[in-house]
Image (cartoon, grey):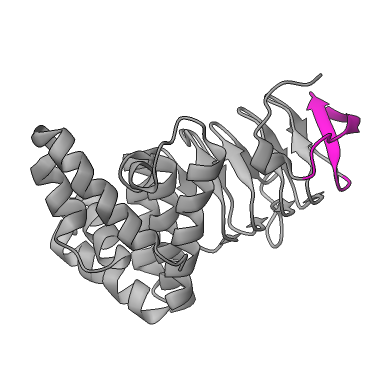
């Protein structure tokens, strides 16, 4: 985990509780009373995904078990928080990313569902997938593979299929689909390279590759492989140039000049 991240989150929570007394109890329960980032996230997400079939206390145990079972999840979560702080100009602190970004919440809960899937606890993984979809409006199959430093910006309507892969340092905006092309089985979903930015409303369909550091403009439909560093736009999308920045996912530019 990023050195000092948890302490900086605690410090920010302490300062915020003094500035806004109305949130003091909330900040104490979600951050200050916990001794680690994992414990805080387990409590926070369990409360959000709570339901009659699996109440928050039971969910908290599942999240804690996953974090203890695979320390790589903690490292991934820390990088995801930092990705939001670095890339989103609205985000003023890591605390804000932790508490208020539902794309981060959905992705972190998915990481636990993915861990459950790998442990062959598929029924519980599917249960979590359903709760994530209902609560956060983000539907990611637990068998999908997603790297670290990933930002789901705004997140509403994002769908990622079973055999999709998303590499490190990718930014995906709202209403994006990484889906199949029909009722085919097997390896049938997109493979997204590192540093890619996928604009809002884009649909990427089929077992195709989106090359490293490519950019997909808003509302595009991708049906064929995309080269590295390509700038794609249209329905169906065509390459209209090369990306001007080294890593589009970090720059987050939404206009095509």
Q: Give, as a single range, the part of the protein colored magenta.
A: 227-246
Report if residue 222 is visible in the image: yes
| Residue drawn at the location 34% of the way across and 41% of the way down | 96
The residue at 41%/36% (across/down) is: 92
**Residue 60 locus on image (x, y percent):** 22, 64
Q: Nearer the viewer, residue 239 or 161?
A: 239
Q: Is 241 left, or right, of 206 in this rendering?
A: right
Left or right of 131, for residue 171: right
- Tell me what residue is drawn at x 47 percent, y 68 percent: 75
Q: Point out residue 10 in the picture as x, y percentages from the top left corner.
A: 26, 55
Q: Position of residue 224 (x, y in %)?
A: 85, 42
Does the segment drawn in magenta span residue 3? no
Whether residue 12 is situated above or below residue 76 in the rendered picture: above
Asked if residue 228 is among those painted magenta in the image, a careful observer would answer: yes
Q: Quadrant of the C terminus?
A: top right
- Of residue 247 and residue 137, the one placed in the foreground of this image is 247
């Amino acid at each position: 985990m990023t050195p000092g991240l948890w302490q900086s989150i605690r410090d920010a929570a302490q300062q915020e509780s003094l500035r806004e007394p109305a949130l003091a109890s909330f900040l104490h329960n979600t951050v200050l009373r916990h001794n680690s980032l994992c414990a805080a996230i387990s409590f926070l997400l369990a409360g959000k995904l709570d339901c009659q079939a699996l109440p928050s206390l039971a969910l908290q145990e599942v999240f804690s078990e996953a974090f203890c079972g695979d320390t790589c999840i903690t490292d991934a979560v820390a990088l995801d928080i930092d990705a939001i702080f670095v890339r989103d100009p609205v985000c003023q602190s890591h605390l804000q990313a932790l508490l208020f970004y539902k794309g981060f919440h959905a992705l972190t809960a998915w990481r636990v569902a993915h861990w459950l899937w790998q442990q062959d606890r598929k029924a519980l993984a599917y249960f979590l997938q359903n709760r994530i979809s209902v609560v956060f409006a983000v539907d990611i199959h637990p068998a999908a593979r997603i790297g670290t430093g990933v930002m789901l910006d705004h997140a509403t309507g994002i769908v990622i299929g079973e055999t999709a892969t998303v590499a490190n340092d990718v930014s995906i905006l709202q209403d994006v689909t990484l889906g199949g092309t029909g009722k085919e089985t097997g390896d049938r979903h997109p493979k997204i390279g590192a540093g890619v930015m996928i604009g809002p409303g884009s649909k990427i369909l089929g077992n195709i590759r989106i090359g490293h550091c490519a950019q997909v403009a808003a509302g595009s439909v991708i049906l064929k492989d995309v080269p590295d560093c390509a700038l794609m736009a249209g329905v169906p999308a065509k390459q209209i140039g090369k990306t001007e920045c080294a890593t589009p996912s970090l720059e987050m530019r939404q206009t095509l000049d």
